Image (cartoon, rainbow, N blue to C red):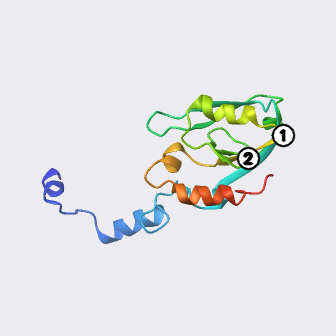
Amino acid sequence: TPIDRWFGWSTESEEERKKEADKAGGYGVPSNFVDSMDPANYIAVELKKPMGIVFEENDEKYSGIYVMELQEGGFAADNGVLEKGDQLVAVGDKKVTGLLFEDALDTIVASPDETTKLILFRGSAKQFYGPTGASQDWLDEFIGAGGVVSE
């Protein structure tokens, strides 16, 4: 009841709380949580240009850019690794997290190599840039070590 909530009294039994924790994967962690400091949640791909990726800016609240669409017949779609919603993290060994749209894309365009390595986070902008996001030190170390191996 509202009075119970106002006083902070819990009307939920211990058994109900345990069931909710189990649904959330235990320890109160939401079942859809993606750890942004776990290398397993990153993917890398090396693609020729034009890649066939349509990038879009995240909401102002989070910054950075993500894969909005893969153009049919493009190198990215044919490669099959990228998915809509992947967050762009690095181009080669250059971190692009939090950059403005044009600056992040310019990094791809400026890459002189025949193929360009992209490192992306497989999760939402909130999971990457929000309070549970990877620390800048962790990202610098991760990207400096080469990130993940390209598929």
Q: Residue 60: image x %, image y %?
A: 46, 33
Residue 28 in the figure: left or right of residue 147: left
Res 68 visible: no
Task: Answer with the quarter of the image where residue 82 lies.
Answer: top right
Q: Secondary structure at mark 1?
A: loop
Residue positioned 61% across, 32% down in the render: 103
Residue position for label 1? 113
Depth check, front residue: 66 or 22: 66
Which one is nearer the viewer's eye here, 65 or 78? 65
Q: Residues within 10 Å of mark 2 (few under 14, many from 20)?
A: many
How packed is label 1: few (under 14 Cα within 10 Å), some, or many (20 or more)?
few
Rendered image quadrant of residue 52: top right
Q: Residue at x 48, y 33 (%)?
A: 59
Observer able to see residue 89: yes
Q: Is residue 133 above or below residue 98?
A: below
Picture coordinates of residue 51, whole percent (x, y): 79, 33
- Asked if disc 1 and disc 2 are in contact, CB closer than 8 Å, the reply is yes
Name above or below for residue 13 compared with residue 131. below
Residue found 84% across the figure and 40% down from its top? 113
Above or below residue 6? Residue 82 is: above
**Which residue position holds label 2?**
92
Q: How far from the left and from the top, in percent, is residue 143?
A: 66, 55
